[in-house]
Amino acid sequence: MGEQQIVLAERPEGRPTRETFRYESIELNAPDAGQVLLETLYISVDPYMRGRMNDARSYSQPFELGAPVQGGVVAKVIESRSDALKEGDIVVGMLDWATKLVVDAKTVRKIDASLAPVSTALGVLGMTGMTAYFGLLDIGNPQPGETVVVSAAAGAVGSIVGQIAKIKGARVVGIAGSDEKTTYLKEELGFDEVINYKTEDVGEALDRACPSGVDVYFENVGGEIGDAVIDRLNPFARIPVCGAISGYNEKENIGPRVQSKLIASRARMQGFLVGDYGKRFKEAAEQLGEWVSAGELKYEETIFEGFDNVPDAFLGLFDGSNTGKLLVKL
Amino acid sequence: MGEQQIVLAERPEGRPTRETFRYESIELNAPDAGQVLLETLYISVDPYMRGRMNDARSYSQPFELGAPVQGGVVAKVIESRSDALKEGDIVVGMLDWATKLVVDAKTVRKIDASLAPVSTALGVLGMTGMTAYFGLLDIGNPQPGETVVVSAAAGAVGSIVGQIAKIKGARVVGIAGSDEKTTYLKEELGFDEVINYKTEDVGEALDRACPSGVDVYFENVGGEIGDAVIDRLNPFARIPVCGAISGYNEKENIGPRVQSKLIASRARMQGFLVGDYGKRFKEAAEQLGEWVSAGELKYEETIFEGFDNVPDAFLGLFDGSNTGKLLVKL
């Protein structure tokens, strides 16, 4: 079988399905001067990509219908016509979902495969780890003894957020969707309290888990979980708004307006994108790498096998079944 | 007729009515050491007071049933047993709604009646002016050429917000509820664009008035007006959240959730209370006084006459009929 890519076949109404995607055979040209031929090793599937499937003003360009879906990819250089990269180098970049591809060498970044498994360049040492790092530290700014609540706490971002908050001396409460996940967060990652939103009343559980209120809420999900946390903010609380996955597939996303709650708590709610912190990526990667090496920061990966399973891996983001970073290994 | 006070007769469900209040006769003792006897000159009625009428956790203590309503008051000292104040001094403070009252001298602040009309201590040089000053400058931080939108723009806070934004070189769009008000904002106060939310589709009007999007939204009203502005935020927009008067009398205040919008714009939405800026009141009062003296900052007052009309003045806040600061002169 030849090389393949995955294109956006139709814009999903609500939740994406297998029909959202279409496989296509591709013919690859030999690389021109400055280009490299890459063989894909890992593909990252991430919730924010759902937004790019809509034909609407958003923080990044919509995917084009019939054009390849793009996301975080780790790949191996198998032919190089660039001085910057040589055969065998491992690189990471925002690339088409394809088994092989030819790109300009300057669109990818070489990673040091001796430091950590190369898949971490898509997770704890890559976009999701940096998202946790900048959102929590730059906007959330947790202080020792403060209570930090994180939703989607067993996810690629949430699990790192909670652990960094612990490193900074905060009390950490994680909200996740299964007893397996909450047990993992408490037993393996050292979260102080955990809430299973599928079996517990989130408001009552927050009252028990946060007797002193909420100082930082790292928002990954929105919806009724977000509503419940925002009802329990302490004075001068901070809410880094990273995601709102509960609403990504909804046409209408309606809930209590936040204005009066923000006044009562003098809270700050701030959206952010990791891309805005490009100048500080090096700082973040070094700090995250140190914490990982020291055993202070653990990470989990859920790995699907095979290019055929990329759509299923993506769809799995929305059923809440994964723990840690969701990847596809080719 | 003797002295009187106004107490909270019942907690309003929804919009307050005359039955929310009850007049009571009072007997005043002579002031003790350190106390003064005051005669009330002006009573301030303000939207935030509605929140204190609920029996709910809020940013300030709820008013007690059967106890006097309290708010901003300007009064004259008619008898003093304090070294800090003498007969004839004019003072401002958070005091009971009463025709006369005895208080500790240290609970009030003397004002210089030679600088400006004493009523301004409740408005442009007092709480509402400072609310505009700190919310706009500290959280909104408008830059020259940026677009600032303010709702309740003809109100005591909004009218000052828009003028300070103009002083800072921003383009100012005001939303208000009558053609009389929008004409006032444009002709008298120099707003660049105005929107009458009662006769125009706010979303369409915003598209016309803000062709470059919204950089700062000074939020006074919430509700559908707030929703419409939040749909038009520029990257890194700031939203000082000062009030949400449209929802104060509603049991349910439901609308589009903001999380995804804040991420897309990387906007910051932050509640504040003027009381949190206590250490900078002197700075604000001096700067506001300078702008007023220089004719750069204009203010309007809507003045009801007589203690009998205090409840009606308060109720008038919620029908959108007043321009500028709403006061009662005794």
Image (spheres, coloured by chain):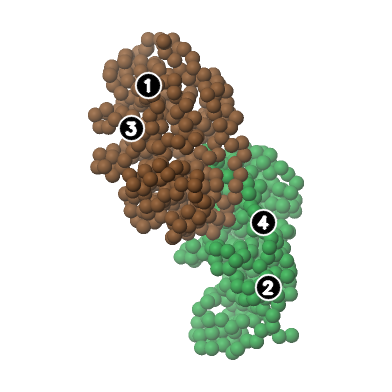
Chain colours: A brown, B green
- Residue labelled with disc 4: B250
* Chain hosting mark 3: A
Give the percent coordinates (x, y) of residue A74: 36, 25
Give the percent coordinates (x, y) of residue B80: 56, 86
Image point (47%, 29%), residue name: A314
Which of the pair B22/B85 is nearer the observer?
B22
Residue type (three-letter) at the residue carrying disc 2: Ala
Residue A283 visible to an observer of this rendering: no
Q: Which quadrant would the N terminus of chain B be assigned to in this image?
A: bottom right
Residue type (three-letter) at the residue carrying disc 3: Thr
* Chain hosting mark 2: B
Residues flagged by tags 1 and 2 on a common chain:
no
Give the percent coordinates (x, y) of residue A118: 31, 28
Q: Is there CB contact under 8 Å for labels 2 and 3?
A: no
Image point (52%, 47%), residue name: A225
Give the percent coordinates (x, y) of residue A18: 52, 24
Residues flagged by tags 2 and 3 on a common chain:
no
Residues flagged by tags 1 and 4 on a common chain:
no
* Circle 4 SS class: loop
Q: Dot 4, crowdedness within 10 Å: few (<14), some or many (≥20)?
A: few
- Badge 3 or badge 1: first in the primary sequence: 3
* Left or right: where A136 falls relative to B244: left
Residue A330's disc number: 1
Q: Is there CB contact under 8 Å for labels 1 and 4?
A: no
Residue type (three-letter) at the residue carrying disc 4: Glu
- Residue labelled with disc 2: B9
* Left or right: where A21 falls relative to B13: left
Mark 1–mark 2 distance (CA, rounded to whole Å) = 72 Å
Image point (57%, 72%), residue name: B94
- Residue labelled with disc 3: A120
